[in-house]
Image (cartoon, grey):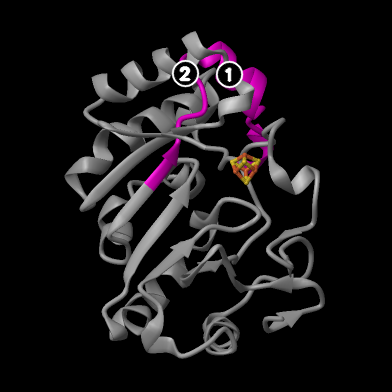
Amino acid sequence: MGVYTELLEYAYTYGDARRLYLNVTNRCTNRCSFCVRYRTEGLGGAVLWGGNEPDLELLKAAVRAQGPFDEFREFVWCGYGEPTFRLGLIRQAASWLRRAGAKIRLNTNGHACLIHGRDVFVELSQAVEEVSVSLNAPNYQRYAELCRPDPATFPASPAAAANQMPAWEAMLDFLCRAPLYFESVQASVVGFALTKDEIESSRLLARSLGVTQFRVR
Ligand code: SF4
């Protein structure tokens, strides 16, 4: 078991014992119909839903509780939610996590700039080497159906208010700019949520944005 406050566990392994997932928020800008958090409260024996978000000291304690620090080869910011809500923590933890030479990956829905109401690429790129962006759909209509963005979670900026598709466009903007800032960029979709044609269209969309790594998860 990991270190937790109330229920939420902040660090856990799932499969590869040398990859540690960092679960630091349950907040999200989407309400995806396929999201695993609507079906189970955790993965790999870890409870990932509920409780308080960690600060840096709680996160460090949770990481140390998972095994010898130097043996982890990869840390993955994930969350039962969108981890870039915790941009400050991601930045605070970067130098500590990198001490043993591990890579840092971010699994994101691509809404970081939308969430913070400003361009956060430079800040994120200083704290993360690799990103996996949830493209999830080949077009806005399917994205709206599947991911059900929640406007209440966006800042009330004039730009967001004027845009009928802020979540979709923010994700596409993040995906196409990401290769300029990160060593590795992957786009992903959820296989069971799309048809084969939609998966192929999504792959082509990612490629048209300059992202050739594509994963059906
Ligand atoms: S973006 Fe991720 S965490 Fe948020 S609802 Fe969708 S699948 Fe769940």
Towards the viewer: 178 or 42: 42
Q: Is residue 93 left or right of residue 98?
A: right
Q: Are marks 2 and 1 in contact (CB under 8 Å)?
A: yes
Disc 1 target residue: 194
Identify the mark at residue 63; answer none if there is no mark.
none
Q: Report x, y in % for residue 98.
A: 30, 79
Q: Give the structural element (helix, strand or loop) at label 2.
A: helix
Is residue 168 on the magenta stretch? no
Query: At 53% from the left edge and 83% from the top edge, which residue is drawn?
Result: 63
Q: Quadrant of the N terminus?
A: bottom right
> What amino acid type is highlighted by mark number 2?
Ile
Residue bounds of the magenta highlight? 132-153
Can you tell me which quadrant of the image ligand 1 is in? top right
Towards the viewer: 170 or 81: 81
Mark 1 CB within 8 Å of ligand 1: no
Q: Report x, y in % for residue 37.
A: 74, 48
Q: Report x, y in % for residue 103.
A: 31, 68
Disc 2 target residue: 199
Query: At 63% from the left edge and 31% from the top edge, which residue is drawn?
Result: 149
Query: At 54% from the left edge and 26% from the top edge, which residue is drawn?
Result: 161
Dividing the picture into quadrants, the one containing residue 205 is top left
Look at the picture and state if 43 lies above or below 158. Answer: below
Disc 1: CA contacts within 10 A as few (<14), some (14-19) or many (>=20): some
> What amino acid type is highlighted by mark number 1?
Leu
Count of picture labels? 2
Q: Report x, y in % for residue 85.
A: 54, 56
Query: At 48% from the left edge and 9% from the top edge, which residue is drawn?
Result: 197
